[in-house]
Image (cartoon, rainbow, N blue to C red):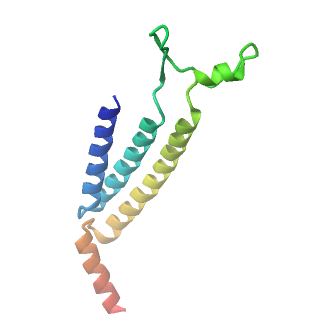
Amino acid sequence: MTFVVAVCVAIIFGTGVYMLLGRELKGIAMGVFLLAHAANLSIIAMSGSPIVYDDQTGESQIKAPPVVTADETLTATLANTADPLPQALILTAIVIGFGVMGFLLSMIFITSRATKTLDIETLAEQGRADAEEH
C-alpha cells in the first residue's frame, strides 16, 4: 500500500512540475494545485497506517478516534487511536490551498481580460513594450 501511495505522489508531483514549466498561466495554476495535493498526500502517507495489528491474536482493527471516555485509561487508549495531527494539518492546508487557488485564478482572469492572452512569452513582450514606452 505504501508503494502505491508513493507512486501516486510521484506521478502527481511530476505532473505538477511539468505543468509549472508550461507557457500558459492556466497550466501554471494547475501545476501549483497539483503540487499542493501531492504534498498533502505525502503527509497522509507518512502519518502511519490506520490499522492496528495484534501480534498475539493475528487480528487487525481500525484505529479509534482520539476520544477518551471516563471508564478508559489514557495509556490504553493512546495505543489504539489515530493521530489527529496529520489530518488537522491536511485540512488546514486544503483550506489555505483553496484560498490561494481562488486568488491565483482571479489574477489570471484579470490578466486575461486586460491583455487578451495567457501566454507567458506574449505577456513578457507586452511588459517590455510597456516599459520602453514609459
Residue extending farthest to the top is 57
Q: Considering only vertical position in the picture, is 68 above or below 11?
A: above
Q: Residue at x 30, y 62 (%)?
A: 25
Query: Which one is nearer the viewer's eye here, 87 or 96?
Result: 87
Tell me, yes or no, if residue 65 can be seen here: no
Coordinates of residue 18 in the picture (x, y in percent): 24, 56
The reply, left or right, for residue 50 in relation to residue 79 is left
Q: Residue at x 41, y 63 (%)?
A: 107
Q: Nearer the viewer, residue 88 or 68?
A: 68
Q: Is residue 53 left or right of residue 68?
A: left
Q: Nearer the viewer, residue 40 or 63?
A: 63
As drawn, which residue projects farthest toward the right? 70
Residue 65 screen position, x and y as percent: 59, 23
Q: In the image, residue 125 lies at what x, y percent?
A: 25, 79
Q: Position of residue 134 (x, y in %)?
A: 37, 92
Number of callouts: 0
Where residue 49 sits, quadrant-wise, is top left
Picture residue at 26% right of the left edge, 69% below the top: 120
Q: Residue at x 44, y 38 (%)?
A: 46
Residue found at the far front of this picture: 56
* Residue 134 appears in view: yes
Quadrant including the N terminus: top left
In the image, residue 101 sits, relative to residue 130, either above or below, namely above
127 up-or-down from 108: above or below: below
